[in-house]
Amino acid sequence: MLDRKYIVENVEAVKQNCANRNITVDVDRLVELEVQRRGKLQLVQDLNTQSNAESKKIGQAKDSEERESLKVSARALREQKDSAQAEHDLIDREIKEIQLQVPNMAHAECPVGVDDKSNLELARGKHTCREFDFSPLDHLEIGEKHDWIDFEGGSRTTGNGFYFLKGDLVMLDLAIQQFAMVELSKRGFTPTITPDLAQDSVLEGIGFMPRGPETQIYSIENMNLSLIGTSEITLGGLYSGKTIAETDLPIRLCGISHCYRTEAGAAGRASRGLYRVHQFTKIEMFVFASPEQSDSMHEELRQIECDLFDAIGVPYRVVDTATGDLGGPAYRKYDLEAWMPGRGESGEWGEVTSTSNCTDYQSRRLNIRYKVKDKKGTHFVHTLNGTAFALSRALISILENHQNADGSVNVPECLQAWVGKSVIGQVPAI
RNA sequence: GGACGGAUGGCUGAGUCUGGUCGAAGGCACCGGUUUUGAAAACCGGCGACGUGGUAACGCGUCCGGGGGUUCGAAUCCCUCUCCGUCCGCCA
């Protein structure tokens, strides 16, 4: 969420930003209410001063007669204060409601456009798209051929969109996790296994809406808990309400969790197989940084994502996300889109990672600050997140890019030690 | 899951029985100064956050784990939740 003072002082910029992001918010109403609220707050504080003074006199009163008469006036003042406070709170709630809808400001270089058509390709990965001398299968065909992916079983036990992973694909899945954790540890990230559930207030702080008709979140009945859609939620929540010493920044965490998404209304050829599922495992990078660090930290996260996908031999392109496609919290967002030969008619790019600089948008909601030693006051930290691997989509990209004509799949060299094989799905020679 | 005990500023720790003089003693740490060739020690002074008004000095408001209540007034009394100890039960 943006600072109210900032919104009031930058009305036109905020409105333009909302338009660029294709989000409708009544900014003028917020400003009008905020001006009202300031006045009301002043009144509340004045009345409080008076009634505090009156109450203090009671303690020093000489006799019970004086005491009783002071009680009457003190009570009256307190009642006036309470009613002014109630009016203030009412206005405050309405402001809060609008304020939560206002998206973060966007980076000056962020491509402007109302949807993903304006996304800008920035770079390509180390590996070029492969020319197949056979007709490549999609990951689901490969997976079902070897009994690695079982959607039918998932559907029977849990529901549509759930699946079992089996056999060597599980080994590959775990290998990717190991590889990511080791690589990220080397780069200063603290490996973190997080809860798969979080309090609704934390979801909201990160920028999710846990309940309501539009929600993508599974929530627990009769509790204020929801299944997380990403460990960004728990990693951000980990420091909620904390004040961090500036010298401890940046704090780099890499979380591993299951991610749960209802994916309401999403279906079709483009979300076939593992591409869009209700549950997957994800290794997520999360960074708390100072405002001075956040831009370069964002580049660092993007570079790590590139390095990881270069390492597993998957071709990809890097996309600078347009304003209309940023979501609420992001100031700037880069996506990696991997080449998926089995997707669509003859291969398509599919989003595999995403890294966002959320500046102080999340930290203001979650109240995460940092303090400079020997300086008065605190400031909100900047938060950044980035996908290392979303396992479901990483598996798609490996299966489809590294498949062989006989249906087997080459294991990227960096993963072979953990898989224990250089090729999986090979039919043993008879 | 049951029974007690606890939660106070960066840390430690008084205050809670007996409500007002408590935004909160003392100590540690930290910062500035005196002293010293320099350092240590000693001594003197300073030292929370947020909001709000003000160019500023500064004023005002809020905050003693979270929420609610009693009262003119709550760190202090009552209810509730969370967390941490200790003992018991159960368990991977």
Image (spheres, coloured by chain):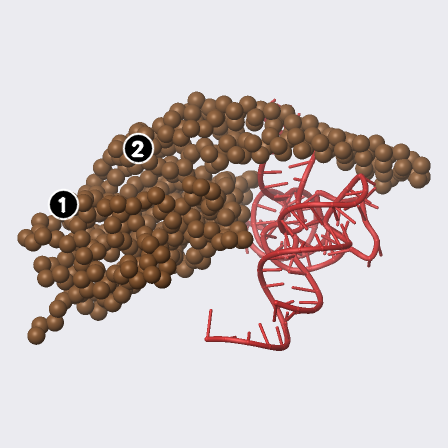
Q: Residue at x 24, y 56 (%)?
A: A395
| Picture quarter with the C terminus of chain A | bottom left
Display colour for chain B? red
Give the image quarter of residue A422: bottom left
A221 sits to left or right of A398: right
Residue A82 versus residue A272 in the image, above or below: above
Sequence order check, earlier mark of 1 and 2: 2
Q: Residue at x 30, y 29 (%)?
A: A113
Q: Residue at x 32, y 54 (%)?
A: A161
Judge by depth and name the residue closer to the eye, A216 or B3.
Answer: A216
Residue ID for mark 2:
A115
Tag nearer the camera, 1 or 2: 1
The answer to whether residue A99 is left or right of residue A333 is: right
Check the residue under mark 1 and report the chain it is in: A
Q: Position of residue A306 (x, y in %)?
A: 24, 48
**Residue A20 to residue A233: above or below:** above
| Local crowd size for mark 1, using a 10 Å CA cut-off: few (<14), some (14–19), many (≥20) | few
For mark 1, what is the residue? A346
Q: Residue at position x 22%, y 37% from top?
A: A121
Looking at the colours in the rendered structure, which chain would you say is drawn in brown?
A
Label 2 packing within 10 angstroms: few (<14), some (14-19), many (20+): some
The answer to whether any part of residue A26 appears in the image is: yes
Which label sits on residue A102? none
Q: Are labels 1 and 2 assigned to the same chain?
A: yes
Residue type at tag 2: Asp
Residue A155, position in %: x, y?
33, 58
Q: Amino acid at mark 1?
A: Ser
